[in-house]
């Protein structure tokens, strides 16, 4: 789930932004559906895991295939990015911001003529703005886009002159500053203020003083700041430079039980030679036990409602995958049961490995 504030096009009564371009996201989903499980798929001979474990999902075809449970959120966030010059995405640590942007949002943006450029602000040697220039180039090459580098006179001039081409289509860049809390944890006041000021001109659409620009129309650009929730307040420091900094923001919430079920069962059912296991299923008791146990765990920890942290689910699913692999090597392919998970105590042991 995601809760969004602001956004051109209005908000639904639930506060979830909706935009005409939802269809684009749906076509992305249609694509995902094509690669979903087909009964009786090929034998597997690969080495890849169906679950990334502790790692975030990446921006590649494999990750997009194995990413489940965040389809609607991916569409909402993509639409918000397209509709606004700046979007802030925030959530508690580990709820899946990086994964969502990489495996859910990036493919949708690309299918709509945008180019996601994910850049970190953790380079303390080269300086923030220079590392953004370099990161953009790296990202453009990674995605096999024809890239004409921009002028390094300023961020404004850079995005005004940089060009990104896919064949004869000029793509609109989306600068995604993931782990943006690093701006506050790694950099001093002066570098921080300098980057925020440069971003401010881009967000406000105002050409910075002293920058030569024949027509001062703003560059076609979208900006996403993704950060941990506990640093959101620090963005308010930037309100002088970017008055609208918190106008359009989305809060990523933990997985609902239904989404968690998809996260668990979706990857297991995929049929593809790259996987080290053949498709497998969980029986209903195994799914129920896992979802109850993991949601009890969070409810106890936070005295709050029941939800599931994706990282916990990854631990359980990775363990199951190892078990299934061993069994399949012995020619056994039966549904994963609650007993295979070791019941409540087996799950508790898995979580204690945290
Ligand atoms: N939709 C999902 N399905 C399954 N696992 C997920 C999903 N989203 C995230 N995860 C898992 O949750 C964990 C945290 O994901 P991720 O690193 O993307 O979160 P984050 O919010 O970016 O964390 P941080 O605040 O540390 O940057 C990883 O183990 C990742 O594989
Ligand atoms: Mg992250």
Image: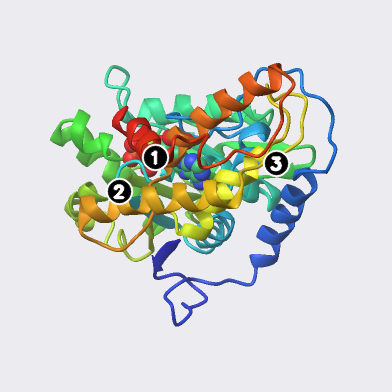
Foreground tag (1 vs 2)? 2
Residue furthest to the front in view is 339
Dividing the picture into quarters, in which one does residue 325 lie? top right
The image position of residue 170, as x and y in percent, is: 70, 44
Contact between labelled residues 1 and 3, with CB atoms less than 8 Å apart? no
* Picture quadrant of residue 40: top right
Q: Mark 1 points at which residue?
A: 312
Residue 53, above or below 344: above
> As drawn, is 289 to the left or to the right of 30?
left
Question: Does residue 128 appear in the picture of this structure?
Answer: yes
Residue beneath the point at 82% across and 25% down: 43
**Residue shown at the point (14%, 36%) measured from the top left:** 189
In terms of secondary structure, where does tag 3 sit? helix
Gap in Å between the C-alphas at discs 1 and 2? Answer: 9 Å
Residue 52, given in percent of the width and then of the height, sits at 52, 30
Query: Looking at the image, is mark 3 or mark 1 earlier in the sequence?
Result: 3
For residue 252, which numbered disc appears in the image? Answer: none
Residue plotted at (57% across, 61% down)? 72
Q: Distance between the residues labelled 3 and 1?
A: 20 Å
Q: Nearer the viewer, residue 11 or 100?
A: 100
Looking at the image, residue 88 sits to the left or right of residue 24; the answer is left
Q: In this view, does 231 lie above or below 130?
A: below
Read off the residue under disc 3: 269
Q: Dot 2: what SS?
A: helix
Which residue shows up at 62% across the image and 50% down it? 109
On screen, residue 151 above or below 310:
above
**Image marks 1 and 2: residues in contact by CB distance under 8 Å:** yes
Mark 1: secondary structure = helix
Q: Earlier in the sequence, mark 1 or mark 2?
A: 2
Ligand 1 image-quadrant field: top left
What residue does disc 2 label?
297
Q: Does the residue labelled 2 lie within 8 Å of ligand 1?
A: no
């Amino acid at each position: 789930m995601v809760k969004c504030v602001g956004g051109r096009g209005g908000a639904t009564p639930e506060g979830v932004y909706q935009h005409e371009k939802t269809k684009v996201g749906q076509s992305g989903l249609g694509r995902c559906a094509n690669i979903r499980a087909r009964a009786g798929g090929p034998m597997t001979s690969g080495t890849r895991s169906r679950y990334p474990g502790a790692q975030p999902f990446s921006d590649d075809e494999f990750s997009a295939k194995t990413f489940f449970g965040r389809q609607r959120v991916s569409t909402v966030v993509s639409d918000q990015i397209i509709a606004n010059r700046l979007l802030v995405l925030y959530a508690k640590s580990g709820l899946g911001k990086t994964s969502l942007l990489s495996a859910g949002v990036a493919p949708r943006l690309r299918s709509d003529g945008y180019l996601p450029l994910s850049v970190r602000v953790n380079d303390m040697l080269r300086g923030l703005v220079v590392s953004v220039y370099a990161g953009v180039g790296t990202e453009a090459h990674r995605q096999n886009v024809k890239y004409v580098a921009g002028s390094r006179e300023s961020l404004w001039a850079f995005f005004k002159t940089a060009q990104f081409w896919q064949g004869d289509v000029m793509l609109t860049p989306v600068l995604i500053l993931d782990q943006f809390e690093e701006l506050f944890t790694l950099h001093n006041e002066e570098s921080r203020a300098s980057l925020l000021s440069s971003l401010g001109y881009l967000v406000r659409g105002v050409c910075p003083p002293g920058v030569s620009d024949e027509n001062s129309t703003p560059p076609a650009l979208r900006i996403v700041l993704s950060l941990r929730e506990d640093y959101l307040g620090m963005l308010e420091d930037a309100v002088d430079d970017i008055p609208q900094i918190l106008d359009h923001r989305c809060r990523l919430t933990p997985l609902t039980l239904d989404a968690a079920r998809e996260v668990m069962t979706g990857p297991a059912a995929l049929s593809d030679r790259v996987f080290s296991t053949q498709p497998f299923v969980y029986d209903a008791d195994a799914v129920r036990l896992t979802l109850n146990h993991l949601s009890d765990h969070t409810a106890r920890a936070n005295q709050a409602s029941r939800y599931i942290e994706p990282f916990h689910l990854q631990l359980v699913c990775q363990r199951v995958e190892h078990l299934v692999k061993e069994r399949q090597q012995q020619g056994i392919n039966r549904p994963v049961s609650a007993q295979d998970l070791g019941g409540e105590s087996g799950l508790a042991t898995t979580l204690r490995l945290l």
